[in-house]
Each structure stands twice: as structure tokens, then as C-alpha cells.
Image (cartoon, rainbow, N blue to C red):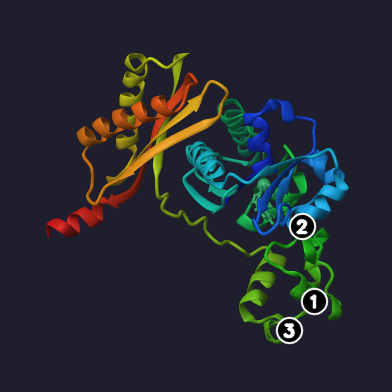
Amino acid sequence: MIVLFVDIDYFFAQVEEVLNPSLRGKPVVVCVYSGRTEDSGAVATSNYVARKLGIKAGMPIVKAKELGKDAVFLPMRKELYQEISNRVMEIISKYGESLEVASIDEAYLDITNKVSNFSEAEILARKLKEEILEKEKLRVTIGIGPNKVLAKIIGDKSKPNGLGVVTPEDVSRFIDELDISDVPGIGKITEGVLRKTGINKLADIRKFSLEELSKLVGRSRSIYLISLANNTYREPVKPRELTHKGRYLTLTENTRDIRIIMPFLKRALSEAYGKIQGIPMEIYVVAIMEDLDIVSKGRSFKFGITQDLALRTAEDLLRKILDTDTRKIRRVGVRLGKILRSSTLEDFFH
Ligand code: TTP
Ligand code: CA
């Protein structure tokens, strides 16, 4: 098995830098304001410049402002980040057989049958990094390993903008050197229990039987740790249904002329329809403006929409965007959501 783990660097803050390059080099802090008082709330994430000042995710905004008086504090724009995450996930999915989206900015990709060895895997990973950088201007870190967990561990150790590999030749030594705190899914409490028992390294797990370990940290966690320590962990990459599919195209020039934009939108729509297996009940038109800001408008239906109706709706939505925004459009696309799967459709007819 060869697995890629892809993690977008300082994700929310990096998106803000991409949309506003003048932020680069400054400490950037993305905040979730609770609204109670002006500065109540917590830090969602910060860029590496802000991290150097000690500003970290989860910290109260007030504390972050003490540490970074001149930092730029921005409100979290979750929908925008989700939109960009979806597009990055679509790029990643092309490189492998199955994609498991683990969070808004993390995914596992099974490339076992796409490459014949780990050096080919590395070449593929570099191409993937380049495509994400070129299309979305985002830097990601990739970990490559013989299973999901090792791919994630080496990925975490390679941040930011990194590429780390655990090859089959390295794997025993790599496992032997891991600290228990390197293992994903082991929280502070479990870590404390293990350390008290003298388990500091993952390799120390091998000194204990499943029964002994289960009494300490529970059975399923014990099975997980034992299989990792013995390099028998082989959880498959489990694709989750992407709930929406999109297609975006770059216009030949930045424009607000609907006659120029419509043919692109039509092609994006038809290609998006080609990608889905089923009929969508929801359509969004997404416009990436000349300054790379993203504007989207959507409509939901109570029934599956044909491509014809989708095209008319898309034109409508595009007009709305142009009516409410004065900027030129650079890229345009559609996103189809709430997809009725073919099997569901067949159920209707049988
Ligand atoms: P992470 O991958 O943990 O962090 P990151 O992408 O900001 O930084 P890096 O990977 O370079 O270390 O989280 C992904 C996103 O999830 C992050 O950009 C913001 C969000 N997030 C929160 O909203 N609250 C949190 O406490 C954390 C840890 C993340
Ligand atoms: Ca990340």
C-alpha cells in the first residue's frame, strides 16, 4: 500500500494571504468572534509569522492581541474556505484511486496502483504540489507512507510546504524512533496513562499484551497502537461521497461581458454534469473576481434538475452576480450539490 497524506499549510490564514497578497510577511490571525464583546472569541488559525510571536489556534483573541499588537486580525470566512477546500480536494482526487477527505484541509489518497514504487510516489506528490500551487496558489505539505497513519505522521513532521517519505526500507527504524505523542489520535489523557506505565516510545507498546494494554487505554485504542507498533496497520483509504462536484474555467480575459462569460459557464456546467453520477438538486455559480475574491450564488430545487434547467438557472445566477458586484470576472464555474445518486434514481423507477 502507498498512501499520500495532504495537508494545506496554515489553511484559513493562507487563503486570506492568497486573496490579499499584501498580507504576506505580516502576522495574520483568523478569528472566530463570539460577538459577546468586541474581542471575545478564539483564534482559528494563524500564519507562521504570527506563530513565531506565540499566536496559536484556540487562544483567546485578547491574548493574541497582547502578543501581536501589529498583527492583522481577520474574521473567519468558513464558506469561502470550504469552497476552496472542495476545489483542492478535486485536484487531489485526480492523482489517486480513492480519496478520503479527513477534514477541511486534510485528505488521504491511495496511490498504490498509480505508481510502482516510492520514488515514483514522490514524483507524483511533487506534481500534485505544483498543480495546487499553480491553480489555487496554495502551499501544502505531503506525507507518503505505507499506511495512512505513517503518511500523516511524516506529513506532520514535514510542515510547512514539505514533502516527507517513509519508504519500506525506512519503516522499521521510523517506527522505532516515534514518540507516543507523535501518534495521531492519542490525546493528552491517553498519553499520560501510557507514560505512567513506562511507555514513552511507540516501540514500548510491543512489551505489552493486548489484554494488559486494554486495561489501561481500552481495547480499540490498544489494537490501533499494537498494529502501528508492529507495522501491521493497514486501514484502507475510505472514500466518502463528495457531496458536490464542481468545474471552473479561466476566461480568456477578465471581463463583465455576459456574452463572453456564458460559453465558459455552459462548458463548465456540461463538464460538471459529466463528472456526476446522478442528478443534482442544487446549483451554484461561482465567480472568481479579478482580485481573486470569490463570489457565489446558488439555488436549490425540490427535484433533480436537468442540464437544460441548470443552464437557464446558471445564467440567472451569473446575472445576479454581475448586478451585485462591480468587478471583472477572471474565472467562472459551477458547483452541483445534493446529488441524487443513480442508484437512488433507479429506486424511484423500480
Ligand atoms: P490545522 O491543519 O490543524 O492547522 P493549519 O492548517 O492552520 O496549520 P498547519 O497545518 O500549517 O499546521 O487546521 C486546519 C484548519 O482548521 C485551520 O486553518 C483552521 C481550522 N482550525 C480551527 O478553526 N480551530 C482550531 O483549533 C484548529 C487547530 C484548526
Ligand atoms: Ca493544515
Specify which label sits upstream in the sequence, 2 or 1: 2
Q: In the rendered image, which residue does mark 2 sit on?
A: 60
Element at badge 2? loop
Q: Which of 289 and 154 is in front in this view?
A: 289
Specify which label sits upstream in the sequence, 1 or 3: 1
Label 2 and label 1: CA atoms lie apart by: 30 Å
For the view shown, which residue lies furthest in the left direction?
A: 350
Q: In the rendered image, which residue does mark 1 sit on?
A: 194
CA neighbours of label 2 inside 10 A, class few (<14), some (14 to 19), many (20+): some
Q: Position of residue 278 (x, y in %)?
A: 27, 46
Query: Mark 2 is on which residue type?
Result: Pro
Query: Mark 1 is on which residue type?
Result: Leu
Q: Position of residue 131 (x, y in %)?
A: 57, 29
Q: Which of 259 and 326 is in front in this view?
A: 326
Query: Where residue 216 is drawn, which disc sits there?
Result: 3
Q: Where is residue 115 in the image (x, y as percent from the top left)?
A: 55, 39
